[in-house]
Amino acid sequence: MVLNPKNTNTMKKGWIIFFALWALLFLLFAFWQINDPDPEWWVPAYIGGAMVCGLAAMNRFPLQIIAALAITYLVCSFFFWPQEIFSWASQEVEQKDLTMKTPAMENNREFFGLIVLAAVTGLAFWQGRKQILVK
């Protein structure tokens, strides 16, 4: 269900800014993934998140699509569950750049990317659902 743009139940300005910023960030992340070893997976994932956030910033919530993406991101994140988060974090701090030194680093980054996508699309679903309930 997509809310009508003439709907009087509009989001607060803070949520509009939140979703607009995440839309831009996800587009930037998609651009950075072009040089990734497997861009065919990550570019569409981040573009999907950018589209959801862009629509949410415009007060449009296709809830079935948002729910499907949020669940997909969350389920896929379990396949990248990090083995050692604290050692990875210390390696990232020590190397002081974004080059991937080990496959575990790539796995951990992909895990956290999917968690962020799931969280932000989950918030979009929550906002859309909240507006329907108020209606």
Image: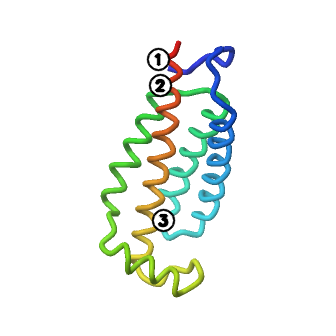
Q: x%, y% of residue 116? A: 48, 53
At label 3, which amino acid type do we have?
Asp
> Callout 3: 10 Å neighbours few (<14), some, many (20+)?
few
At label 2, which amino acid type do we have?
Arg
Q: Is residue 122 left or right of residue 32?
A: left
Q: x%, y% of residue 124? A: 52, 36
Residue 133: mark: 1
Q: x%, y% of residue 91? A: 46, 83
Nearer-N-terminus badge (3/2):
3
- Provide the secondary structure element on which disc 2 rests: helix
Question: Residue at label 2?
Answer: 129
At label 1, which amino acid type do we have?
Leu
Residues under labels 3 and 2: Cα distance? 34 Å
Marks 1 and 3 in Cβ contact (< 8 Å) = no
Q: Quadrant of residue 103?
A: bottom left
Question: Residue at label 3?
Answer: 38
Q: Is residue 63 above or below residue 53?
A: above
- Provide the secondary structure element on which disc 1 rests: helix
- At x 32%, y 75%, the residue is 84
